[in-house]
Each structure stands twice: as structure tokens, then as C-alpha cells.
Image: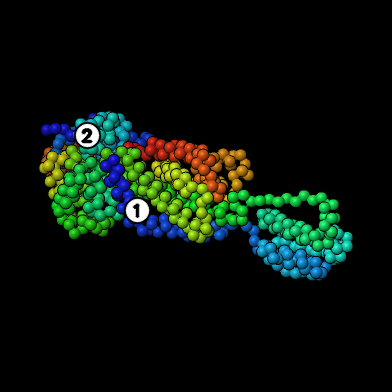
């Protein structure tokens, strides 16, 4: 399988504080890669470096075969990103948001039209298509955000705690969308607080104090730690944390 | 180019959906241009005059009438003695006391000479100086009238006098509006243009949409052009409204070329929007952007030459006026609107402001980071 993300000793320091401490891992095409950790463990910082939003202090990283140091702007054509904050334009309608992002990713007029109709239909937002995004409930907004993040068929999509504050049934629907995207060959890099969601990932990586403490499939992790759920694995590792959460 | 199209479409949609912004944009110039020039008026009127007329003659009455009919003075009181009048000054009821001594008429007609006394409350120096100036001029006029009345034409010529006749060029009626309104319009365009741009971008930072843009392949200069063009357009609209108001309310019609005004405006907006952009790149929250803008607006307001002449500022202050773009526009506005200056008269101004625009925008683009 093709490797889509590769890091070696990737590090980010803010002054004396080492936010991300020499992390190394590889993610394969189409994989759902879960990034777990307590608040302040360095998940978001690691993700921001891979998206080209933050410059690494040291180490190596390539995303979609492109080096994060030399061509961060080239990476941006190949990735989608959904941040912790809701970041669609609330004063634009559902359709306007989709068309805007499709447009700035360089889709043709025909593709934009086709894509936006397809998305609205798939999300069941036909009635809300011409309503302002601010009128949508949170769960719908997150689903829309995700759809917009992959509107240009990126190689990788980075999701930073996409289901925070979303109700369980909506979370289930959200994960169905993730599976769907993964089947289409989009690699999913997702951070989460919800340990039950970790079970949905192909592989998970648990970060403690900026370092990777465990990285494997959920089944093997449970087996190695001799427990029957990921929550237990997480607690065993998180107990070692010296940093307090933020 | 295609990217820019989408950015512009989005920006204009957001602007026209933002009712609060639109209201501010259209109401501010209307209200401010109608109200501010009335208040920011240096013409001294309503000077309170207390008169101590110890002569009570036809001549003293004539003098008082002449003063009152000038329109600049208001009779605060007729007082029987100087002491009473002085009390009025102490109580701030009178600005100037005119004392006409006993025997005024007699001395004037028989001895051809008479002294008058003026006491001026000089707490407000401008009012005092201008007021006593007016009064002196009126008394001089009065004096001439009497000379004409009393002396034979042949004797007038025997006494040589120098009469100064000044003619006011460009603004013959010394209309304060003609001077202030174009300047205030410049200040408005500056505030609206600079502040709206800064606020807009900082707002995108705050709600996080700018980060979403930063992970897309949108180029920095696309993003910045996508912000500059809409606000440039708004600036032109606000300026046009201002010109219309100046014409309707104050009857001010630019003497020079309106096209030249717009040419300068175009270049000026480039500089001032670049300034707004620069502020936004240094601010994380709207609050910070506001504080920064407020700081500079004070300087623009007081040092742009809007209220006080730059020529009478000390050297260091003149230097500041030379590095802020607003002083050039205020100057150009007055040159074109009042004096009817031509292209070659304002060419240097255009070049300097253009250079400022290039510097400010380059600085802003360099300081705007997609990657931290």
C-alpha cells in the first residue's frame, strides 16, 4: 500500500516547551488513523504541522509525498482540513459555502455545480440549501464541514476533534461519512476525545506529553495491554502524564 | 484569477448581508458631514460685549450701533461703571468690555482725538484675539466715517495714511465650510476604509475561517486582493456620497477636475486599506485592532492638517505629517476643490501616496503568514 503520511522525529517547540516530541509514524492510503491524547498532549500541534499551518522545529515529514518544510503550499492542494472551531462562513448559505470552497480549490464550473447538488442531496439538506449556515444545528454543521473539507477529493483529510459536542446518533452518522470517504481512497487522520470512537479507527496512536506512547490496531492494543477496551489502555497510558490538561 | 473571482463573490455577499455594517457605512458620512462642520467652525461669533458708556452722546450711540450691527457681537449688558462690567467678565458673562469715557463726543469733535479702552477676557486666546481684532477694525471704520464727515476733502489728503486692503483669494467669502467639509470627508474615508478592512480580517481570524483559508491553496496576494477590492469599492462609494452631500448641503462644487479627485482617491485608498491590512496582521482580536486604530486615528485627526495649519507646527510634528497619508489627501482635496489645482500641481502628492501604498501593502503581505 502507498504511504500517504510519513514522519520521522517530528518535533515542535514553543520556547522551552516541547509540544510535540520526536514523533514517527506512517499512514497508508485509505487508512483511518486515530490520534488520541489528553488535552495538551500535542495532537492539534502535530496535525497543524502536517497541514502546513505550523512549521516544524525539527524532524522530517511528508504528506502525499510532499515535504512539509519545502513545499507546504503544495501540500494544501492535496489535503482537506476540518478544525476544532466551526469554520464555514455563517453568513453564507449552505450552497454558497460549498461553491466557495469548491471554487478556491480550483474545481471547474461544471464540477462545482455537480458536486454541490450531490452534496446537498447526500446530506439531506435540500430544504436548507439556500439558508444561512448559522441556522443549522451543530451536528449538521459538522457534517457539512466534513463534506466541504473533502469537496476537492483530497488525498488526506485532517479532522481535529470533529465530533466534539455532537450527540451520539449524529456522531454515528458522521462516522458513516468517514467510512464512506475512506472507501473512496481518502486517507483519514482524525483526533478525538471520544474513546469509543477510537474503536472505529483502523489504527490508533496515543499521545502522552507530546510523545507517542502506543501505536497499533485497536484489537492489538487491547491484547497487548491485557484489557478489553481502549478506554482502559488510554487510562493506563494517561496516568503517566506529567503535563496537566489545559 | 478564478480564485479571486470566488473570493470577491464571497466578500461582496458578506458585506451586503451585514446590515449593521451597511448602516454604519451609509449613515456615518451623512450624519457626520452634516453635523461635524457646524461644530468644527472657527468663525468667532456671539462675542459677549459689555459696554460702559460714560458719555451717553449721539456719537457714542452711533459707535455702539455700528458694533452691534456687525453681527459678531452680542450685547451682554450696559453697565454704569467699569467695575460692574469687570464683574461680568469674572462671572464669564462678558468677553470684552468697551469703555467709552466721558466727553467722548466733545473730545472727538473739538480736539480730534479720543482714547477708548478695551478689556478682553483672554482665557480663550483665539476668541479674545479675534474679538478684539474685529472690534478694532470696526472702531477704525467708525473713525474714518467721522473723518469724512468732519474734515474738508482737502485736509484729508494732508494727513498721510496707509490703508491695507486685502483680498481673499480662492475662498473670497472666507467660508469655513469650504475649508472644513472637504477635509472632514477625507477623515471619514480614512476611518471607514482603514477600520473596516482591519476589523474584517481580524474577525475572520477570531471565528477561525482564516485558518480554513490558510489550508487551501489560496495565495496570499489573492486573499489580500480579495479583501482590498471590495473595501476599495466601498471607499469610493462613501467618498461619492460625501461629495454629493457637500454639494447639496453646503453648495460646495469642486473648482478643479472631479476626475483628478477620483484619481487621487484611488491611490489614497490603496494606501489606507494597506494600512488597515497591516493593522489586522498585527492583531489577533477585534479589540486589539480597535486599540491600534484608535491610536493612529488620534494622530491622523490632530496632525493631518484638518484643523490646524501644518505650517505652524514644530519641525518634528511636520515630519509626522509628512509620513501620514491623510495630510496629503487633505491638502489635495483643498487644492482641487477650493483652488482648482491641476494634475501637475498634485503629481508629487500622488507619487508619494502611491509609494506609501506600495510600502504598506508589501509590509502587510510579508507579515501575513499562512504558516506560523
Q: Quadrant of the C terminus of chain B?
A: top left
Whole-percent x and y of residue B321?
55, 42
What mark, if any, has residue B93 been given in the picture?
Answer: none
Whether residue A195 is visible: no
Could you tell me if the residues under marks 1 and 2 are in contact, i.e. CB atoms within 8 Å? no
Residue toward you, A173 or B251: B251
Whole-percent x and y of residue B364?
40, 39
What colouring style does the render use? rainbow
Residue toward you, B301 or A156: B301
Tell me what residue is drawn at x 58 percent, y 42 percent: B317
Tell me what residue is drawn at x 77 percent, y 49 percent: B162
Q: Which residue is mark 2?
A: A63
Whether residue B280 is visible: yes
The answer to which quarter of the image holds residue A102 is top left
Helix, strand or loop at mark 1: helix
Q: Chain of mark 2?
A: A
Tell me what residue is drawn at x 83 percent, y 68 percent: B55
Q: Are marks 1 and 2 on the same chain?
A: no
Q: Is residue B365 left or right of residue A156?
A: right
Q: Is residue A150 left or right of residue B285?
A: left
Helix, strand or loop at mark 2: strand
Label 1 CA crowd tier, 10 Å (few <14, some 14–19, many 20+): some
Tell me what residue is drawn at x 55 percent, y 50 percent: B338
Q: Is residue B78 left or right of residue A206?
A: right
Q: Which residue is mark 1?
A: B15
Q: Residue furthest front?
A: B154
Whole-percent x and y of residue A27?
17, 35
Q: Chain of mark 1?
A: B
Whole-percent x and y of residue A2?
14, 32
Q: Quadrant of the N terminus of chain B?
A: top left
Q: Nearer the viewer, mark 1 or mark 2?
A: 1
Amino acid at each position: 500500500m502507498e504511504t500517504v503520511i510519513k514522519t520521522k522525529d517530528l518535533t515542535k517547540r514553543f520556547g522551552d516547551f516541547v509540544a510535540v516530541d520526536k514523533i514517527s509514524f506512517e499512514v497508508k492510503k485509505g487508512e483511518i488513523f486515530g490520534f488520541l491524547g489528553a488535552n495538551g498532549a500535542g495532537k492539534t500541534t502535530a496535525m497543524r504541522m502536517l497541514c502546513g499551518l505550523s512549521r516544524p522545529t525539527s524532524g522530517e515529514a511528508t504528506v502525499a509525498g510532499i515535504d512539509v518544510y519545502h513545499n507546504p503550499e503544495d501540500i494544501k492542494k492535496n489535503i482537506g482540513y476540518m478544525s476544532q472551531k466551526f469554520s464555514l462562513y455563517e453568513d453564507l448559505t449552505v450552497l454558497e459555502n460549498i461553491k466557495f470552497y469548491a471554487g478556491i480549490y480550483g474545481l471547474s464550473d461544471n464540477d462545482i455545480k455537480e458536486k454541490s447538488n450531490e452534496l446537498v442531496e447526500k446530506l439531506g439538506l435540500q430544504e436548507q440549501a439556500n439558508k444561512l449556515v448559522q441556522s443549522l444545528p451543530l451536528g449538521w454543521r459538522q457534517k457539512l464541514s466534513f463534506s466541504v473539507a473533502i469537496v476537492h477529493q483530497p488525498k488526506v483529510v485532517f479532522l481535529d476533534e470533529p465530533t466534539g459536542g455532537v450527540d451520539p446518533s449524529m456522531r454515528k452518522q458522521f462516522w458513516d461519512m468517514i467510512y464512506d470517504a475512506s472507501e473512496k481512497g481518502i486517507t483519514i487522520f482524525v483526533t478525538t476525545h471520544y474513546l469509543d470512537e477510537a474503536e472505529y479507527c483502523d489504527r490508533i496512536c496515543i499521545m502522552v506529553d507530546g510523545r507517542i506512547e502506543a501505536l497499533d490496531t485497536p484489537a492489538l492494543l487491547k491484547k497487548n495491554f491485557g484489557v478489553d477496551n481502549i478506554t482502559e489502555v488510554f487510562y493506563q497510558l494517561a496516568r503517566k502524564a506529567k503535563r496537566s490538561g489545559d | 484569477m478564478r480564485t479571486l473571482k470566488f473570493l470577491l463573490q464571497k466578500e461582496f455577499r458578506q458585506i451586503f448581508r451585514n446590515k449593521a455594517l451597511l448602516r454604519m457605512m451609509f449613515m456615518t458620512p451623512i450624519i457626520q458631514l452634516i453635523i461635524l462642520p457646524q461644530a468644527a467652525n472657527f468663525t468667532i461669533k456671539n462675542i459677549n460685549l459689555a459696554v460702559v458708556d460714560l458719555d451717553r452722546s449721539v456719537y457714542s450711540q452711533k459707535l455702539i450701533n455700528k458694533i452691534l450691527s456687525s453681527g459678531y457681537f452680542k450685547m451682554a449688558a450696559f453697565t454704569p461703571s467699569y467695575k460692574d462690567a469687570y464683574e461680568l467678565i469674572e462671572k464669564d458673562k462678558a468677553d470684552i468690555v468697551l469703555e467709552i469715557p466721558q466727553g467722548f463726543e466733545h473730545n472727538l469733535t473739538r480736539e480730534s482725538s479720543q482714547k477708548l479702552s478695551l478689556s478682553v477676557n483672554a482665557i480663550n486666546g483665539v476668541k479674545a484675539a479675534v474679538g478684539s481684532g474685529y472690534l478694532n477694525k470696526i472702531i477704525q471704520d467708525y473713525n474714518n466715517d467721522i473723518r469724512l464727515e468732519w474734515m474738508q476733502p482737502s485736509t484729508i489728503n494732508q494727513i498721510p495714511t496707509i490703508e491695507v486692503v486685502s483680498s481673499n483669494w480662492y475662498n473670497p467669502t472666507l467660508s469655513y465650510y469650504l475649508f472644513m467639509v472637504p477635509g472632514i470627508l477625507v477623515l471619514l474615508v480614512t476611518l471607514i476604509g482603514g477600520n473596516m478592512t482591519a476589523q474584517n480580517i481580524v474577525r475572520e481570524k477570531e471565528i477561525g475561517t482564516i485558518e480554513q483559508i490558510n489550508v487551501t491553496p489560496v495565495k496570499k496576494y489573492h486573499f489580500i486582493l480579495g479583501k482590498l477590492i471590495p473595501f476599495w469599492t466601498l471607499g469610493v462609494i462613501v467618498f461619492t456620497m460625501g461629495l454629493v452631500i457637500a454639494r447639496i448641503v453646503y453648495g460646495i462644487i469642486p473648482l478643479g477636475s472631479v476626475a483628478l479627485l477620483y484619481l487621487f482617491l484611488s491611490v489614497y485608498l490603496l494606501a489606507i486599506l494597506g494600512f488597515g491590512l497591516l493593522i489586522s496582521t498585527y492583531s489577533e482580536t477585534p479589540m486589539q485592532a480597535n486599540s491600534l486604530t484608535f491610536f493612529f486615528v488620534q494622530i491622523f485627526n490632530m496632525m493631518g492638517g484638518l484643523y490646524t495649519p501644518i505650517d505652524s507646527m514644530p519641525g518634528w510634528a511636520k515630519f509626522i505629517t509628512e509620513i501620514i497619508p491623510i495630510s496629503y489627501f487633505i491638502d489635495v482635496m483643498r487644492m482641487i476643490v477650493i483652488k482648482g489645482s491641476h494634475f501637475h500641481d498634485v503629481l508629487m502628492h500622488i507619487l508619494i501616496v502611491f509609494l506609501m501604498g506600495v510600502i504598506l501593502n508589501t509590509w502587510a503581505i510579508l507579515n501575513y503568514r499562512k504558516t506560523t
